[in-house]
């Protein structure tokens, strides 16, 4: 299996978040982990499908922040006709998305709708970056975290899958450690915010009395594990190209609005001291090392925060660490945009050069 380049990225400026539960509000931090603020093709015809949802709104704002303006927004018939700033939402239909008047489309609409709407768009020549689970494990569809396996995106045949919101930060942390010492096994416990379950879940949380907040496991359950746990295992294996990697996950929903956290325990083939692991992680693209990562600091940030690196005496060559990430940004929208900019930058002018 050929080695992959670990791609580094530049920085971006400030943005304004749009959304029913967190904005608009400015953020002006350093954004290490972006592909960059340059606009490769300002006329690129972009579609944001699911624009009225939490991830769709972040996607739209990040695109605007990067200078893209030739954008159309799509959502279900319930939101059609509504406005997001200067954009009027169109109804997302197979006919509309398959009309051939878009170059690239971001889909954040759920598995069922992606399976229905992505294929006609691809047939019309649109490159589709899909956030749902519809195509992630499909043979021949790249599942991409640009800092980890960005080269795989170039192998697409119309669809690039955007990974699960916890698989993205997990793979970003595991990849450099695997390169350094080899992974023998991984165990992870996630603490996932309610925004990962959608806008309705956030509104329900805000309507609850604080004393009624609970930890939940609100994913499909097969009697042994939740589908979120299976996704995390299977997608991380595919991203890292380690199909036999032993990986056990336990996923929990916590009563916070934004920000996923992960407690991770790894066993490596070669001994890796905590100090050495810290230096590796601090130098890895898209990561920010903190001795004790604060989940609140991740909100609005583009980096994945990692820290609390320490020896795990329960296994040979064991390490424990803690990771936090804004699940709506790097865990979803930003990663998708990084994929698209990677594709456009690698393929212009030959790929989009023929568009009218």
Image (cartoon, rainbow, N blue to C red):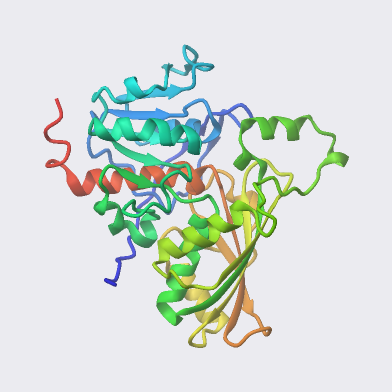
Judge left or right: residue 146 versus residue 288.
left
Among the 4 quarters of the image, the one containing residue 291: bottom right
Could you tell me which residue is drawn at 42 percent across and 53 percent down? Answer: 137
What is the residue that sits farthest to the right in this orientation?
Answer: 211
Callout count: 0
Judge left or right: residue 294 versus residue 209.
left
Among the 4 quarters of the image, the one containing residue 54: top right
Could you tell me which residue is drawn at 40 percent across and 29 percent down? Answer: 48
Query: In the rendered view of the protein, which quadrant contains the C terminus?
Result: top left
Residue 348 x %, y %? 16, 42
Residue 206 x %, y %? 75, 32
Above or below: residue 207 compared with residue 230: above
- Whether residue 279 appears in this view of the structure is yes
Residue 82 x %, y %? 50, 14
279 or 108, which lies in front?
A: 108
- Whether residue 68 appears in this view of the structure is no
Query: In the rendered view of the protein, which quadrant contains the N terminus?
Result: bottom left
Could you tell me which residue is drawn at 69 percent across and 45 percent down? Answer: 218
What is the residue that sits farthest to the front in this orientation?
Answer: 223
Above or below: residue 271 compared with residue 342: below
Residue 215 x %, y %? 77, 49
Could you tell me which residue is drawn at 26 percent across and 22 percent down? Answer: 99
């Amino acid at each position: 299996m050929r080695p992959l380049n670990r791609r580094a990225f530049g920085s971006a400026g400030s943005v304004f978040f749009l959304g029913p539960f967190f904005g608009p509000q400015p953020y002006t931090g350093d954004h290490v982990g972006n592909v960059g603020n340059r606009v490769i093709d300002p006329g690129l015809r972009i579609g944001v499908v699911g624009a009225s949802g939490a991830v769709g709104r972040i996607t739209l704002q990040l695109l605007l922040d990067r200078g893209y303006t030739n954008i159309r927004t799509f959502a279900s018939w319930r939101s059609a006709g509504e406005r997001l700033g200067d954009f009027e939402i169109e109804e997302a239909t197979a006919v509309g998305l398959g009309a051939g008047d878009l170059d690239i489309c971001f889909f954040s609409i759920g598995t069922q709708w992606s399976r229905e709407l992505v294929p006609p768009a691809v047939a019309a020549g649109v490159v589709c970056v899909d956030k749902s689970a519809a195509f992630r494990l499909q043979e021949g569809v790249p599942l991409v975290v640009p800092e980890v396996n960005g080269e795989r995106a170039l192998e697409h045949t119309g669809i690039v899958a955007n990974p699960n919101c916890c698989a993205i930060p997990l793979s970003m942390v595991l990849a450099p450690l695997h390169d350094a010492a080899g992974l023998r096994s991984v165990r992870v416990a996630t603490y996932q915010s309610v925004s990962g379950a959608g806008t309705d879940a956030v509104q329900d949380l805000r309507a609850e009395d604080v004393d009624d907040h609970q930890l939940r496991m609100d994913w499909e359950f097969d009697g042994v594990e939740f589908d979120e746990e299976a996704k995390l295992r299977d997608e991380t294996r595919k991203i890292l190209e380690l199909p036999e990697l032993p990986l056990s996950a336990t996923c929990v929903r916590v009563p916070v609005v934004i920000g996923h956290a992960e407690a991770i325990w790894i066993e490596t083939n070669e001994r890796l001291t905590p100090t050495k692991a810290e230096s590796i992680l601090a130098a890895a693209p898209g990561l920010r090392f903190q001795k004790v990562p604060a989940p609140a600091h991740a909100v609005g940030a583009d980096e994945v925060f990692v820290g609390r690196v320490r020896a795990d005496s329960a296994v040979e060559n064991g390490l424990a660490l803690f990771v936090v990430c804004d699940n709506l940004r790097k865990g979803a929208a930003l990663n998708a945009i990084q994929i698209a900019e990677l594709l456009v930058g690698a393929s212009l002018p030959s790929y989009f050069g023929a568009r009218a």
